[in-house]
Image (cartoon, helix red, strand yellow):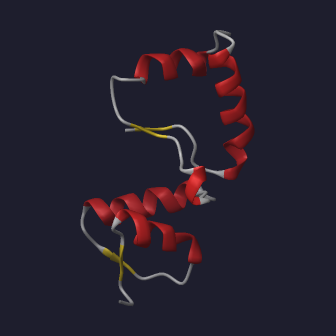
Amino acid sequence: MALIRDSQRSIGTERRLAIDCFRSHSTVESEKLDALLGAEPLAIGDQALGITVRRTIDTVIATRCIESPFALLHGDRDFDPFVTHLGLRSALD
């Protein structure tokens, strides 16, 4: 799975990518997106839910725990959406 948007720092990049795609402006990113569309699942974030992953490392840690499956002992609210929406198990539950 390709991760297109994984942090607040990439929001500007995401907007530029969307604009480049709609204007048929060729960039490395727009070409990669064009190649991936329909070929493999893409994670681009869900703004409708108002969820933004703030740090890439949170995604890496949560993904490792979900795939293994390990429970994660954490005190960081950034992991709550992973618990609620993606099946991350909290060690405190």
Answer with left or right where residue 35 lies relative to residue 39.
right
Which residue is located at x 28 percent, y 72 percent?
A: 70
Please determine whether, in this image, residue 71 is positioned above or below residue 67: below
Please determine whether, in this image, residue 77 is positioned above or below residue 32: below
Residue 66 lies in what quarter of the image?
Answer: bottom left
Q: Quadrant of the N terminus?
A: top left
Which residue appears farthest toward the front when viewing the image?
48
Residue 67 percent across, percent down from the top left = 27, 59
Which residue appears farthest toward the bottom when viewing the image?
92
Which residue is located at x 62 percent, y 18 percent?
A: 21
Please determine whether, in this image, residue 18 is positioned above or below residue 61: above
Which residue is located at x 24 percent, y 68 percent?
A: 69
Q: Quadrant of the C terminus?
A: bottom left
Answer with left or right where residue 81 lies relative to residue 13.
left
Which residue appears farthest toward the left when viewing the image?
69
Residue 68 percent across, percent down from the top left = 24, 63
Residue 90 percent across, percent down from the top left = 38, 81
Residue nearest the viewer, comparing 3 with 19: 19
Q: How many marks?
A: 0
Residue nearest the viewer, comparing 23 with 70: 23
Which residue is located at x 35 percent, y 85 percent?
A: 91
